[in-house]
């Protein structure tokens, strides 16, 4: 198979996962194809084929992609709902903050990993504040974060308790207040 044929094949979300694995194995030194493999997995698991969560091939590809130099591929693995916890734990220590932020947004990231991301930089806290799996005790602290977007995402988080939302009614930012009011059913 040529490079161009592989790229064309990987554009198909209905491509059998075994074929995706074979293309990755053949072209794992080709950054463009590696990126397309990551994109293929991201597209198929977010929309098309939820049964892939039980696929050994998918898990193997996610493991392989979590170790490539290409940040975009690690980014796709971090946000994938089928990524195993041990890989999410590894990516939570990635040097690229966007990769860590996407681990923080992934609702399948275990709580102990989310807790470890709590003291990370703003972009990671922002992801954490919107994750419905973030524990209420962390959301309570994030609700007083110095960054408006972190507080706004806490107000919009479906798992934020009414007690926290009531505290956000006194926020200094009108957008945060409005989001809390909406969640509390105080506005039409």
Image (cartoon, rainbow, N blue to C red):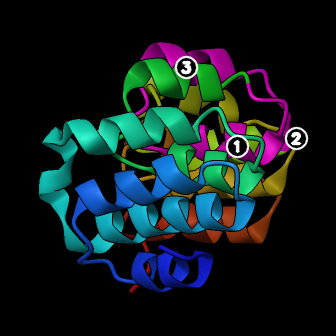
Q: Position of residue 38 (x, y in %)?
A: 53, 59
Residue named by callout 1: 99
101 in magenta: yes
187 on left or right of 77: left
Residue named by callout 2: 146
- Asked whether residue 140 appears in the rendered view, the answer is yes
Q: Tag 1, which secondary structure?
A: helix
> Looking at the rendered structure, which numbered label has been put on residue 140?
none
Instruction: Determine the CA span between mark 1 and mark 3.
Output: 11 Å
Q: Position of residue 126 (x, y in %)?
A: 70, 47
Q: Height in image: 144 above or below 113?
A: below
Closer mark to the observer between disc 3 and disc 2:
3
Q: Which residues are magenta?
A: 94-122
Q: Label 1 neighbourhood size at 10 Å, few (<14), some (14-19), many (20+)?
A: many
Q: Height in image: 132 above or below 188?
A: above
- Asked whether the beta carbons under mark 1 and mark 2 sit within 8 Å of each other, the answer is no
Residue appearing at x 19%, y 66% in the figure? 49
Q: Tag 3, which secondary structure?
A: helix
Q: Label 3 neighbourhood size at 10 Å, few (<14), some (14-19), many (20+)?
A: some
Residue named by callout 3: 89
Along the viewing direction, whichever of 48 and 183 lies nearer the viewer? 48
- Asked whether residue 170 appears in the rendered view, the answer is no
């Amino acid at each position: 198979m040529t490079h161009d044929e592989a790229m064309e094949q990987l554009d198909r979300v209905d491509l059998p996962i075994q074929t995706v694995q074979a293309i990755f194995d053949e072209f794992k030194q080709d950054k463009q194809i590696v990126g397309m493999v990551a994109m293929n997995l991201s597209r198929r698991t977010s929309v098309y084929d939820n049964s892939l969560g039980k696929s050994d091939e998918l898990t193997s590809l996610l493991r392989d992609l979590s170790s490539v130099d290409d940040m975009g591929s690690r980014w796709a693995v971090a946000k994938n709902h089928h990524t195993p916890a041990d890989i999410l734990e590894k990516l939570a220590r990635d040097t690229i903050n966007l990769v860590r932020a996407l681990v923080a947004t992934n609702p399948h990231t275990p709580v102990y990993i989310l807790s470890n991301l709590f003291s990370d930089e703003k972009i990671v806290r922002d992801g954490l504040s919107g994750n419905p799996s973030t524990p209420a005790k962390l959301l309570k602290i994030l609700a007083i974060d110095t960054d408006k977007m972190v507080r706004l995402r806490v107000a919009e988080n479906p798992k934020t308790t009414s007690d926290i939302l009531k505290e956000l009614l006194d926020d200094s930012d009108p957008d945060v207040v409005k989001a809390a009011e909406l969640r509390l059913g105080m506005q039409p």
